[in-house]
Image (cartoon, helix red, strand yellow):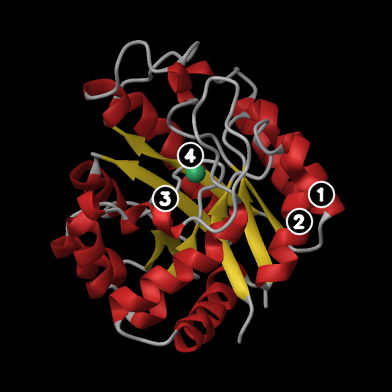
Amino acid sequence: MPPLYDAHNHLQDDWLAPHLDAVAADLDAVGLRAAVVNGTCEADWPAVAALARRFAWVVPSYGLHPWDAGNRTPDWLATLRTTLAADPHAAVGEIGLDRWILDSAKSDDPRLAGLRRAPLEEQGEVFLKQLALAATENRPVTIHCLQAFGALEGLLRHVNTPARGFLLHAYGGPAEMVAGFAERGAYFSFNGAFLDARHAAKREAFRRVPADRLLVETDAPAMPLPAERVRFTLPPATDGSPINHPANLAATYAGLAELRGVSVEALAAQAQENFARLFGRK
Ligand SMILES: [Zn+2]
């Protein structure tokens, strides 16, 4: 069985901190070779860097997430440049556009507590500055997009993206837009939460992703798999919300292999090649 690659998680999250040794052992047991650990705000970039020093399999990625764009400091871009300069192999992300926090999220959603929700235009400015940085240095970049695929497509039309491509993580856009994004260099990572019965449209989109643009991710500790797919559990967070164990990556590979009608071995070999091409890590 080829090794597994998590194209997107948040290992630095406080929810995982008390369990890291056990999580690392479980990841080893399922055959993890590398995981892209995405910073989301200035405050968590040092924690991502520390994880990269601690675990050789961590691919550090630094970015300002659209949820955090509204709370950035005046120095954010300078800090990002310095952080990236310290590691020539680091990636950029997670960055992006999110209309859901503006139009659909509840006003008391605990995940958004204390955040100023930046309007889409402001999110776009923050996004484009980071994308330009990635393009100039040809670094891998991870894009988050929720309910803003038309806007994203419009922006990508007018700017440079890294020659090596970019990742649309947990792609939840229309199946019809897959080909256009792929032409612009997109890779698409499949999230285990899409195995839930409600996400038929997202699964359909992943049937259309070209094999050489396919990746697999957990977004752990967020986006838990449907209960019957979960193989690794962690105690819930203090507010009672479930924590997605990063080793559920293996079950996510299995689910995507079923969906694509291929063996897990074949999928894993393809994902290994794709991960190496985009993130530069075998
Ligand atoms: Zn994420």
The answer for how far apart the CA atoms under marks 1 and 4 are is: 36 Å
Q: Which residue is mark 3?
A: 227
The answer for how far apart the CA atoms under marks 3 and 2 are is: 22 Å
Q: Which residue is mark 1?
A: 21
Q: Under tag 3, what secondary structure?
A: helix
10, above or below 159, in the image? above
Badge 2: few (under 14), some or many (20 or more) residues near its Cα, within 10 Å? some
Quarter where residue 123 is shown: top left
Q: Nearer the viewer, mark 3 or mark 2?
A: 3
Q: Nearer the viewer, mark 2 or mark 4?
A: 2
Amino acid on which the number 3 mark rests in the picture = Ala
Name the residue rendered at 50%, 25% in the picture: 68
x%, y% of residue 192? Answer: 42, 57
Amino acid on which the number 2 mark rests in the picture = Ala
Name the residue rendered at 65%, 33% in the picture: 15
Q: Nearer the viewer, mark 1 or mark 4?
A: 1
The answer for how far apart the CA atoms under marks 1 and 2 are is: 5 Å
Which quadrant of the figure contains the N terminus? bottom right
Q: Return the disc, 3 or 1, that comes first in the chain's sequence.
A: 1
Q: Under tag 2, what secondary structure?
A: helix
Q: Return the disc, 2 or 4, that comes first in the chain's sequence.
A: 2
Q: Under tag 4, what secondary structure?
A: helix
239, above or below 37, in the image? above
Q: Which residue is mark 4?
A: 129
Badge 4: few (under 14), some or many (20 or more) residues near its Cα, within 10 Å? few
Q: Can residue 169 be spotted in the picture?
A: no
Report if the CB atoms under discs 1 and 2 are less than 8 Å apart: yes
Quarter where residue 89 is shown: bottom right
Q: Is mark 2 within 8 Å of ligand 1?
A: no
Q: Which residue is mark 2?
A: 24
Of 214 and 121, nearer the camera is 214
Name the residue rendered at 44%, 27% in the picture: 67
